[in-house]
């Protein structure tokens, strides 16, 4: 993660132990870094960019340690879960 000239912060997310070469846009990762950047920048409303191959912008609000994120989304998959008793 780093400060950005265009957005409030820019990041990338990797999880090789989970066989994730690079996450396109990691919402859970931003839940961790947005409170840090909110405090560093003295702002409650931030724009974050994840610089992966596909990339994406997240619009974030942070109040203390609580963060909310909004962005555009793409359906990745659908599935059914059958539970037998």
Image (cartoon, rainbow, N blue to C red):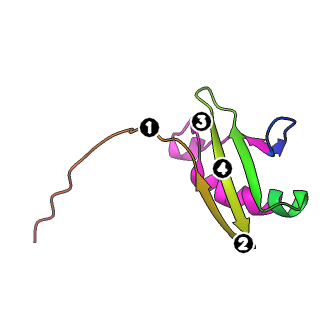
Question: Residue drawn 44% across and 37% down?
Answer: 74
Secondary structure type for disc 3: loop
In the rendered view, tell whether residue 8 sits above or below residue 74: below
Give the residue number, with chain letter if any, for mark 3: 22
Cα separation, mark 1 vs mark 4, equals 16 Å
Q: Which residues are magenta?
A: 9-36
Q: If you read the primary sequence from the N terminus, does the residue marked by circle 2 or circle 1 appear first? A: 2
Location of residue 36 in the rendering, given as x and y in whole percent from the top left corner: 81, 61
Q: Is residue 16 magenta?
A: yes
- The residue located at (84%, 39%) in the rendering is 4
SS class of the residue under badge 1?
loop
Where is residue 50 drawn, in percent x and y? 68, 38
Q: In 3D space, how far apart are the residues under numbered discs 4 and 2 (Cα atoms)?
A: 16 Å
Tag nearer the camera, 2 or 3: 2
Q: Can you name the residue that lies furthest to the left here?
A: 85
Q: Residue furthest top?
A: 53
Question: Which is closer to the viewer, label 4 or label 3?
Answer: 4
Residue at 87%, 36% in the rendered image: 5
- Mark 3 in CB contact with mark 1 (< 8 angstroms): no
Determine the secondary structure under disc 4. strand
Label 3, residues with CA under 10 Å away: few <14, some 14-19, many ≥20: some
Q: Which residue is mark 2?
A: 65
Q: Quadrant of residue 43?
A: bottom right
Asked if 55 appears above or below 13 in the picture, the reply is: above
Label 4 Cα neighbours within 10 Å, binned few <14 / some 14-19 / many ≥20: some
How far apart are labels 2 and 1 at the CA level? 27 Å
The image's mark for residue 59 is 4
> Which residue corresponds to mark 1?
74
Mark 2 vs 3, N-terminal side: 3
């Amino acid at each position: 993660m780093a400060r950005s000239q265009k957005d409030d912060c820019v990041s990338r997310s990797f999880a090789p132990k989970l066989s994730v070469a690079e996450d396109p846009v990691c919402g859970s990762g931003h839940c961790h870094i947005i409170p840090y950047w909110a405090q560093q920048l003295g702002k409650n409303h931030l724009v974050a960019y994840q610089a992966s191959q596909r990339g994406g912008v997240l619009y974030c609000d942070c109040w203390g340690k609580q963060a909310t994120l909004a962005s555009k989304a793409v359906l990745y998959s659908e599935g059914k879960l059958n539970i037998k008793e």
